[in-house]
Image (tube, rainbow, N blue to C red):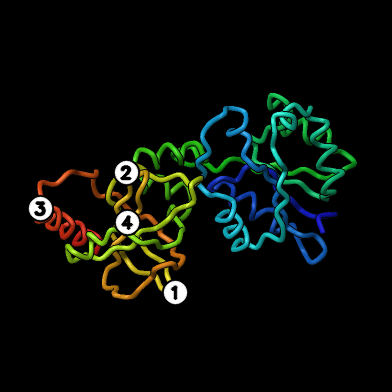
Amino acid sequence: MTTGSVCAIGGFDGVHRGHQEVIKRIKSLADAEKKAGIITFSPLPIFVLKAKDIFYLTPEPEKEGIFQDLGIDFIYYISFTRDFAEMCPEGFVEFISAKIAPSVIVVGENFHFGKERKGTTRILKEMARDRFMVEVIPKIKDESTISSTRIRELLLLGNIRAANNLLGREYSLQGRVIKGQGKGTRLGFPTINIEINKDKLLPLDGVYKVKVQHNGEEQLGGMFCRHDLIEVHILNFSGDLYDKEVGIKIIERFRDIKEFADDKVLKNAIARDIQKVSK
């Protein structure tokens, strides 16, 4: 299936605007005989080499859904280990040629590979000669650097609008609705609690305007986001979503999380948040 394919190589965490340009190019080169594929790593190299806690912009199931929507035919996962990281650039090119046998590889201009990232796009072109063609996509010129690292920084600062601009879509959460404590219902603002993939990066704690996708519908909502709790009130909704899968598109951050003197003060604060959501 992969032989003769047109593939992009990279981490693709977030599948942001820069990644999308690479994907557009492989789609334009693919045809009935040349499948469009993604070659990526699991886990991502940064989480292996820098021993960081793993928090993805797009965990694998979410990333696979985005790739499918973009018309990708297959994904080839390379298991990234410290041993694999020791592979020399030439060994990496031989691995791609032997295991995947693509006709064309498309990468971004900042792509590096092999031990200590010594392989550059120039080296890739030289080593790939007589094996496969290599095409390099230049960076998108933007007022801000488009990278997964920058998007993570913006999300952790609560700057959702800037993060969404670099992504080319709203940052989203996906998960199953679970039982909550029912406090929102008692206050007159029923909420759903959502169980999120433990590897998913959550934005800065706070209250957000969101769009909730469920049962083929999309409605506005207000989201309370804390590192251990995602709770959403859906405007003008009275159904039961317990144990259902929902999607949350994050639009805007309103405020920090606060402690309130009593339930009356809390109820008034929630009412103000809902007014902002409805605008």
- Residue assigned mark 2: 205
For image coordinates 17% across by 62% down, the residue present is: 187
Q: Earlier in the sequence, mark 1 or mark 2?
A: 2
Q: Gap between marks 1 and 2, in whole Å?
A: 27 Å
Q: What number is the disc on residue 215? A: 1
Of 181 and 67, the residue lying toward us: 181
Mark 4: few/some/many CA within 10 Å (<14, 14-19, 20+): many
Percent across and percent down for residue 120 are 71, 30
**Circle 2: residue type:** Asp
Number of on-image labels: 4
Distance from Cα at disc 3 to Cα at disc 2: 20 Å
Quadrant containing the N terminus in the rendered view: bottom right
190 relative position to 187: left or right = right
Q: Secondary structure at mark 3?
A: helix
Residue 279 visible somewhere in the drawing: no
Residue 122 position by quadrant: top right
* Kind of residue sitting beneath label 4: Glu
The kind of residue tagged 3 is Val
Q: CA distance from mark 4 to mark 2?
A: 12 Å
Q: Secondary structure at mark 4?
A: strand
